[in-house]
Amino acid sequence: MWQPRRRQLATIKAAVFALCLVPFAHLVWGVAYDALGANPVEAVTHSTGWWTLFLLCATLTVTPLRRATGANWLLKLRRMLGLYAFFYVALHFLTYIWLDQWFDLAAIAGNVLQRPYITVGFTAFLLLVPLAATSTDAMQRRLGRNWQRVHRFIYLIAAFGVLHFWWLVKRDITQPAIFALVLSCLLGVRLYWSLRRRAGAARPAVATSGG
Amino acid sequence: MLIRTSSDVAPSEITPKSVYLRRRAFLARAVALGLVAPLLPAQARAAGARMLPGRRWPLSTGEKPTPYKDVTTYNNFYEFGTGKDDPAVYAPKMKTRPWAVTVDGEVKHGGEFGIEDLLKLAPMEDRIYRHRCVEAWSMVIPWVGYPLAELIKRVEPTGRAKFVAFTTKLDTETMIGTRMPMLDWPYVEGLRLDEAMHPLALLTFGLYGEVLPNQNGAPVRMVLPWKYGFKSAKSIVRITFTEQQPKTAWNQAAPNEYGFYSNVNPNVDHPRWSQARERRIGEGGFFTRKRKTLMFNGYADQVARLYAGMDLKKFF
């Protein structure tokens, strides 16, 4: 399997970094030139939400793709993808509390408590904060084995994100259903590995006892 | 120097009274339309959009009309797709001529009404109404039409008629959204007969002084400004008078979310979102706040009596 050199990896990282900024640039341009249609706040809310889910799925694709192809360097992109997911969800959340609710804390609290799609969406956002905060090399070293335990919350966060989308659409569930299918595959393959690992761990034990 | 007095105006140059009175009426209408005409995009006129003038209606809201572009590109018309921009893309292919509306059920003089006859049935009026979608956005739209009551009086419902059902055209050829089971096609909406007879209930043929663009429900639709937008059926092909409450599309799809009445009510939330505020489309810019939603969309003085004594939380 092809492995990029240090310089090539830097180029790839820069390209992915720039690519992930394209939706944001499009929104900034759209707001500045009034090019986001009749309801620009809705357009920004939907776009930032959609890209959050897309980037969460992209983050979760890194490991299966790496294992399937042996392209270990892909791991070097994972943190950036995850942080971009956080970047878009932060914009999504900011749009909601600012342009939609105008910092009406009572109304926001009411929504979070009473409207299930907002409850799961808000929970997913809160859970993503510690993951973003502990994404540095230093935190990874300091947390040791716990780092992975904390970051496994990404599975729950992504599931909550898709549920949030599913519960808010009026009638046409095509888009959330596609995300649900993709996420099911990404989580399903991990479940499969986990089951096989357990079976693999059990087999030698059986063999030893037999011998 | 001879100072001439009044005698140098030939009698033939004097504008006859009937002409200048007509001109004055024309100017008055031009002034009324002048409020809205600058918002019309040039291409709408260039494309030969047919004019549909109406007489001024004194009760129009004085709020600033939503730009023509927003009114005609941000639409919910699921027959053409569930995206807001789908109807503007796909609806132009729908044929609106020939077109007939069947009036049947509990009526004495039912039958088929050709669209040309409907257009001539009563004088057109320019009515600027607030429009509130169940999704918590709103517009201000200058419609052209006449009260549905004009048609109802002519067809004479029988004593058994209690409700009116409106059926939207179903053409899977051009209405690509109907190939998916989003709703139980064809789209049916309905009213109680007294609601349908209310003078605000407008049988609508135009907007912004022109015939309706297809995406807005051409060639004929209902407009019920005190109800959520989905109650106003578009591209109507059948009006049926019934004894039983009709089964309506959104109510059938999600009865706990979309009631038969669906009157605009800031105090009764949609189960999944608040109805207390609304985003006024085209108002201000990106950083404009939402507005407070008004009871019956601001038409409480006119329509509240229709629901006197009813529990509006139960009959939402």
Image: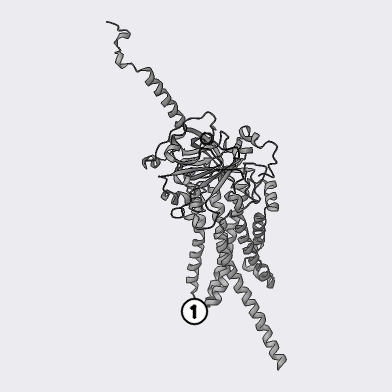
* Residue placed most toward the observer, B213 or A185: B213
Residue at (39, 42) in percent of width and height: B43
| Quadrant that contains the C terminus of chain B | top right
Looking at the image, residue B20 sits to the left or right of residue B63; the answer is left
**Residue A187, quarter of picture:** bottom right
Looking at the image, residue B100 sits to the left or right of residue B226; the answer is left
Q: Under tag 1, what secondary structure?
A: loop
Residue B166: x %, y % from top left = 54, 44
Q: Amino acid at mark 1?
A: Met
Toward the bottom, the furthest residue is A211
Looking at the image, residue A134 sits to the left or right of residue B237; the answer is right
**Residue A158, quarter of picture:** bottom right
* Residue placed most toward the observer, B303 or A87: B303
> Does residue B283 appear in this view?
no
Where does label 1 land, which residue? A1
Residue B18: x %, y % from top left = 38, 19
> Does residue A143 appear in this view?
yes
Residue at (44, 51) in percent of width and height: B89
* Residue placed most toward the observer, B164 or A116: B164
Q: Is residue A138 above or below residue B55?
A: below
Toward the left, the furthest residue is B1
**Residue B263, quarter of picture:** top right
Label 1 marks a residue whose chain is A
Residue B120: x %, y % from top left = 44, 34
